[in-house]
C-alpha cells in the first residue's frame, strides 16, 4: 500500500466532507488516522492523493466511494451488555412498566454497530419472559440502525467470532443464546426474530422508522458537533412516544441541547424520559 500523507488543506477539506456526510467531527491533528484508514481505498480507486479523493467525493457522482469512505471513518467499538446497567434497568423497571401497553413494544438501537446492543436487548426480553411469565403482554420489536454497511452486514448475519463473543457475555448466556456454526457463534432464532437492521444516517429523517417506547443512542453523540447533537436529540424526542425513554452513553447528556427530556434516577442508574407535555 502506498503511504499517502495529507497537507493541512487536504485534511481540512476532508474533515468538511466527513462532517457534512456523517456528522463526525475529527478535530485537529488526526491526519494519521485518515491516512491509515483510507490509504488502501485510494490505491484501489487509483486516486493519487487526498485532494483527488475529496474532489471525487465532492462531485457527488460516486455514491459507492462516498459510502466506503464514511464506513472506513466510523469507530465501531461495541460489546455485549455494554455498561450493564441499561439492561438491568430494562429488566427491572422498563419491561414491567411498559409490559401491559397496547401494540408492540418498540425499541430502537440507534448507531447499533455490529448488532451486540440490539441482540443484548432481545436476550433480556427472552430472560424476562422466562423469569416473569405473563408480565410482558406485548410483542417486542427491536430496530437496529447504523450508517456503516459493513457493520450492518455482521449484525444481519448474527454470526460472531470467538474474540467478539468473549466481550461481555457470560458463559451461561453464550450457551443459551448462541449455536456454534462453522468457525463462528450464531445468535439463536428466538433472539434474532425480534430484531431487524436497517441502514440509517442519524443526520437524515427518522420518520420511516415509526415511533418508539425506548431508544438506545449510546457512544455516538460524542463524535458530533453541538449543533448536530441538538438536532439529533430533538428528532429522537419526536421519534419517542410521550413518556418514552432514552439511554445515552455514560459521558453524554441531553440537558444542554434540549428541554425535551427529564432525568430519572433509578436504582440501576440514570435514564432520560421524554416529558409527557413536551411539544416538538
Ligand atoms: C462506538 S460505536 C457505538 C455502538 C453502540 N451504540 C455501543 O454503545 O456499543 C458508534 C457507532 O456509531 C455509528 N455512526 C457514526 N456516525 C453515524 C451517523 N451519522 N449515523 C448513524 N450511525 C453513525 C458508527 O458506524 C458506529 O457503529
Image (spheres, rainbow, N blue to C red):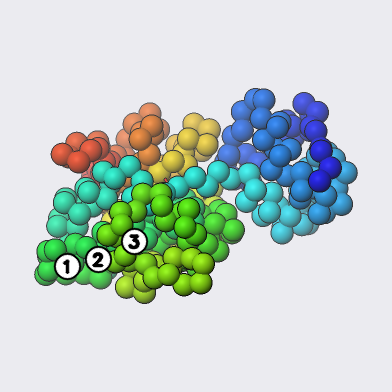
Disc on res. 175 = none
Please provide percent x and percent y for residue 31: 71, 31
Snapshot quadrant of residue 151? bottom right
Dot in front, 1 or 3: 3
Disc on res. 130 = 1
User: Above or below — where is 57 with respect to 16?
Assistant: below
Residue labelled 1 has its Cβ within 8 Å of some atom of ligand 1: no
Please provide percent x and percent y for residue 83: 33, 42
- The answer, for residue 222, to whether it is visible in the render is yes
Dot 3: element: helix
**Residue under the image location 24 percent in, 66 percent down:** 126
The foreground one among 191 and 234 is: 191
Earlier along the polypeptide chain: callout 1 or callout 3?
Answer: 1
**Residue under the image location 47 percent in, 61 percent down:** 160
**Which residue bears the numbered disc 2?**
126
- The answer, for residue 254, to whether it is visible in the render is no
Earlier along the polypeptide chain: callout 2 or callout 3?
Answer: 2
Snapshot quadrant of residue 274? top left
User: Above or below — where is 26 with respect to 138?
Assistant: above
- The reply to whether the C-beta atoms of the residues labelled 1 and 3 are less than 8 Å apart is no
The foreground one among 31 and 53 is: 31
Dot 1: element: helix
Please provide percent x and percent y for residue 213: 28, 56
**Which residue bears the numbered disc 3?**
174
**Residue under the image location 12 percent in, 64 percent down:** 132
Dot in front, 2 or 3: 3
Give the Cα separation between the discs numbered 2 and 3: 14 Å
Please provide percent x and percent y for residue 207: 45, 59
- The reply to whether the C-beta atoms of the residues labelled 2 and 1 are less than 8 Å apart is yes
The foreground one among 51 and 159 is: 159
Amino acid at each position: 500500500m502506498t503511504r499517502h500523507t495529507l497537507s493541512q488543506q487536504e485534511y481540512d477539506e476532508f474533515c468538511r466532507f466527513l462532517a457534512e456526510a456523517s456528522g463526525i467531527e475529527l478535530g485537529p491533528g488526526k491526519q494519521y488516522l485518515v491516512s491509515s484508514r483510507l490509504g488502501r481505498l485510494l490505491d484501489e480507486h487509483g486516486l493519487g492523493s487526498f485532494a483527488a479523493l475529496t474532489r471525487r467525493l465532492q462531485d457527488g457522482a460516486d455514491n459507492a466511494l462516498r459510502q466506503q469512505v464514511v464506513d472506513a471513518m466510523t469507530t465501531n467499538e461495541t460489546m455485549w451488555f455494554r455498561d450493564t446497567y441499561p439492561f438491568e434497568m430494562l429488566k427491572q423497571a422498563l419491561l414491567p412498566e411498559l409490559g401491559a401497553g397496547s401494540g408492540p413494544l418498540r425499541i430502537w438501537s440507534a448507531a447499533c454497530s455490529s448488532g451486540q446492543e440490539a441482540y443484548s436487548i432481545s436476550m433480556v426480553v427472552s430472560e424476562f419472559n422466562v423469569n416473569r411469565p405473563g408480565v410482558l403482554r406485548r410483542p417486542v420489536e427491536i430496530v437496529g440502525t447504523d450508517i456503516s454497511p459493513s457493520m450492518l452486514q455482521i449484525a444481519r448475519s448474527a454470526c460472531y467470532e470467538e474474540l467478539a463473543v468473549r466481550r461481555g457475555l457470560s458463559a451461561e448466556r453464550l450457551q443459551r443464546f448462541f449455536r456454534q456454526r462453522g468457525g463462528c457463534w450464531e445468535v439463536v432464532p428466538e433472539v434474532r426474530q425480534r430484531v431487524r437492521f436497517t441502514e440509517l444516517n442519524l443526520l437524515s429523517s427518522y420518520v420511516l422508522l415509526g415511533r418508539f417506547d425506548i431508544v438506545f443512542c449510546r457512544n455516538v453523540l460524542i463524535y458530533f458537533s453541538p449543533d448536530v447533537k441538538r438536532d439529533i436529540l430533538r428528532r429522537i424526542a419526536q421519534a419517542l412516544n410521550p413518556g418514552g425513554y432514552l439511554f445515552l452513553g455514560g459521558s453524554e447528556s441531553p440537558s444542554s441541547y434540549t428541554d425535551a427530556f427529564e432525568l430519572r434516577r433509578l436504582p440501576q442508574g440514570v435514564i432520560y424520559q421524554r416529558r409527557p407535555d413536551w411539544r416538538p
